[in-house]
Image: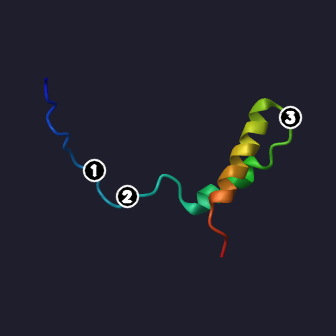
Amino acid sequence: MDAFPPVSGDYTAPPHLPLLILDEARQAVELLMNFEDDTDEVRAAFQLAGDIALRLPAAE
């Protein structure tokens, strides 16, 4: 059995930013909720926005 060497490397230099900050997530949800046509894509976007909104912490 061949063994692979351990993976090593450096992360990018700080600061490390989250993939999506809270304000960006709230803005994305707000924008997705504004779609008005009735296509499959819009329904999927609306569902995604609703799912994400439920996982966001309450605004302060």
Quarter holding the N terminus is top left
Return the x and y of residue 6 as percentages of the image width and height. Answer: 16, 39
Give the label on residue 49, or none.
none
> Which one is in front, 17 or 39?
39
Real-space CA distance between mark 3 and mark 1, rounded to the nearest whole angstrom: 43 Å
> Which one is in front, 55 or 49?
55
Left or right: where 50 falls relative to 7: right
| Residue at the outermost top position | 1
Return the x and y of residue 60 as percentages of the image width and height. Answer: 65, 76
Name the residue at 78% across, 49% down: 33
Real-space CA distance between mark 2 and mark 3, rounded to the nearest whole angstrom: 39 Å
Return the x and y of residue 49 as percentages of the image width and height. Answer: 70, 49
Give the label on residue 38, or none.
3
Give the label on residue 11, or none.
1
Element assignment for label 3:
loop
Instruction: Answer with mark 2 or mark 3, whichever residue precedes in sequence.
Output: 2
Give the label on residue 16, or none.
2
Whether residues under marks 2 and 1 lie with C-beta atoms below 8 angstroms apart, the answer is yes
Q: How many marks?
A: 3
Return the x and y of residue 42 as percentages of the image width and height. Answer: 77, 37
Count residues near mark 3 (Cα–Cα under 10 Å), then give few for <14, some for 14-19, many for 20+. few
Element assignment for label 2:
loop
What amino acid is labelled 2 in the image? His
What amino acid is labelled 1 in the image? Tyr
Real-space CA distance between mark 2 and mark 1, rounded to the nearest whole angstrom: 9 Å
Instruction: Answer with mark 2 or mark 1, whichever residue precedes in sequence.
Output: 1
